[in-house]
Image (spheres, helix red, strand yellow):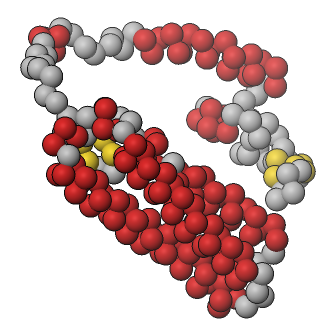
Amino acid sequence: MTIASALIFLLLLVPVMILHIFLPYLSRETISFGVTISEDTYYSKPVADMRKRYALTSAVLFGVLIVLFILVSFSDSEPVLSIAVPAYIGVTLVGSSILHLYFHRKMKTFKASHPHATAANKGTLAIDTSFRKQRLVLSNKWYLFTLASSSPVSFSVWRITGKCQISFRCIMTFRGTSRLTAPNPTASCCFPTFCRSL
């Protein structure tokens, strides 16, 4: 694997790694590691320490995995690389699942040993669903606005070119450049769907 392809693969993995590390900080204040708790308990020192420990442990886990993947990716052996990518993904999934289950069980035991950690039921919530009796579907006349706004553009393109289809083929190369080839009345660089439908 070349350095460029290894960097592209790492750019795909870094956002996943960051999301896993900050997972406990991205959840609601009433849920910690999948366990419902009160907001006061969420901000308590033991639970905050648990979140920090999770973030540190997952950062170390993913850091070691990325370093190992970088070391393996510089080998020129194709069979090794064909095993390295699925192995990295599999170890990431299994490792993050085991880590999350470990902290989930720890949070459940913390909640059981601290009765004040349970979220208090603050009252009854009444929901009025009578709005469903009203007409919620928009009229099909909204499509007229789209038709009216796109028709002048389509007509202008047709008037400027003199015909709908552009008489050359545009080929994009993998280097980001385009080249023109022999005339082909059925191909179009712009508006391909519109031009072929007329």
- Which image quadrant: the N terminus? bottom right
Q: Quadrant of the C terminus?
A: top right
* Left or right for 15, reference 138: right
Q: In terms of image quadrants, where is residue 103?
A: bottom left
Query: How far across and how far down the image is residue 182, in percent?
Result: 88, 52
| Above or below, 193 relative to 140 | below
Residue at 55 percent of width and 68 percent of height? 61
Query: Where residue 133 sits: x, y (%)?
Result: 13, 11
Report the front residue among 116 and 77.
116
Q: Residue at x 20, y 46 (%)?
A: 114
Q: Is residue 12 above or below residue 85?
A: above
Position of residue 152 in the picture relative to residue 30 (left or right): right
Q: Out of 151 and 33, give the one closest to the viewer.
A: 33
Relative to 163, residue 135 above or below: above
The answer to whether residue 154 shows anywhere in this view is yes
Q: Residue at x 45, y 41 (%)?
A: 26
Q: Nearer the viewer, residue 193 or 34?
A: 34
Looking at the rendered structure, the number of numbered marks drawn on it comes to 0
